Amino acid sequence: MPNRKLRAGEGVRSATGGAIALGLCGAVALASGCDKVMELLGVGDASAPTTGATESTAPVVDGTGPKIVPGPGTLPECFAPWSKDTKFLQWPARRPPFRLALVNGYVGNAWRIQMVKTAKAFAKDPAVAPLIKEFKVVSTGTNLDAQLAAIEDFIRQGFDGIVTLAVSPRGFDHVIELANKRNVLIVPFDGILDTDRVLEVNEDQASMGRQWGEFIDKQLGGKGKVLEVRGLKGNSTERDRHQAFRSVLGAKEKRYAIVEVVGSWDDAKAQRAVAQALAGHHKFDAMMVQGGSTGAMRALIEAGHKPIPVATEAENGARKLIAKWASQGAKGLSLGDSPGLAAIAIKATLEGLRGKVLPQKISVPIPAADDATLKDGENYYSKLSDNFFTPNEFPPCGVNVSSVEIMNESEADLK
């Protein structure tokens, strides 16, 4: 019998009876693999009818995943295709309620915490809850193998859909193949994958980087010293924003000196990074900060730095400071990468499981505000926490989770 290397996650199972199958998978290197062992022991696998909508409690073992079909898709006002070349996908229709899981990676900053809370609150929405039989949440950290293991575990337990904020844009081939075999939807959002084999939900992160760059270039007129505060390294969102931002400021005939620090999308880390940059460089003409914007701006204030043009994320605290600086003539642009993307990913998963046609890559508009359009109580909130991310409601998608509902949830795993 040939040896077979165990893939990420095959040593992690939680379903009853799975331990027996796992023992055989680990001790006996069967040529047919662990899937066959699980099937023979009756752990989690059962053949599903091939026509009509099937019960979600009957996972298939011989599926092929989605079909490429003609558009347009369902609810185009919510699920807009990324471009005119975006293909459309359709999975076999099943009847709700469904078993869903959110597999997050890193949970160590305000955006991730709010994202998890938003997902939990949306799953309880009266219009959504009847479609969900079970909802689990797990945050696995920045380790790719841990995230893949968690996704594989949920697939083998018979979950119908898994939304995930991927810690890496690559490395998901095995779990995608396993999900397709069982017609499970994997839906990455925000931190997406470098593949067109799964449904994806995102804002145009490259567009966000370009807009930040264009804003600073307009303010400085082609030259100056700019502080760039980068996000969490290794993430596709961080990469796409950075590259697009640099493409604007690094264009021919531009004369910018760019100082780069890492804030990891975290207020405390961004504040320290900016303070250290100021200690060495003393002054800057503008600043772009991917996340942790409130902390980055506080570092400027605490150092006695004069107000400068800032291009930031949409943290409530950053928008408060931009509004305050506007009275001194300073300019600011705040673009929102909304934690509500998690809710839209859940909604897309529910539509896909019911056989609705969807764009392979769904484009969500980027909420924006600047020093001229900021209005208390409308796009920032003086009475709410600085760490609250302002854009969370997407009426065309039926995503209307209130700040109170979000803040009442916990970021802890939901097991």
Image (spheres, helix red, strand yellow):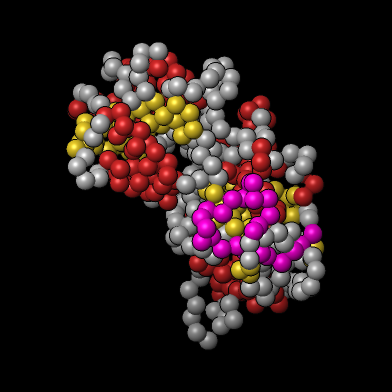
Q: Is residue 154 above or below residue 36?
A: above
- Image location of residue 180, percent across then percent down: 61, 68
The residue depicted at 19 percent of the width and 38 percent of the height is 255
Q: Position of residue 350 (x, y in %)?
A: 70, 53
317 inside magenta stretch: no
Which residue appears at 55% of the width and 18% of the height?
376
Left or right? Give the position of 294 relative to 394.
left
Query: Residue extending furthest bottom?
Result: 1
The answer to whether residue 380 is above or below residue 196 is above
Residue 105 against residue 43 in the figure, above or below? above
Closest to the observer, 266 or 383? 383
Given residues 383 and 174, the one toward you in this image is 383
Residue 308 falls in image quadrant: top left
Q: Magenta residues, as a range? A: 72-95
Q: Residue at x 55, y 38 (%)?
A: 339
* Visible residue check, residue 268: no
**What is the chief secondary structure element of the magenta stretch?**
loop
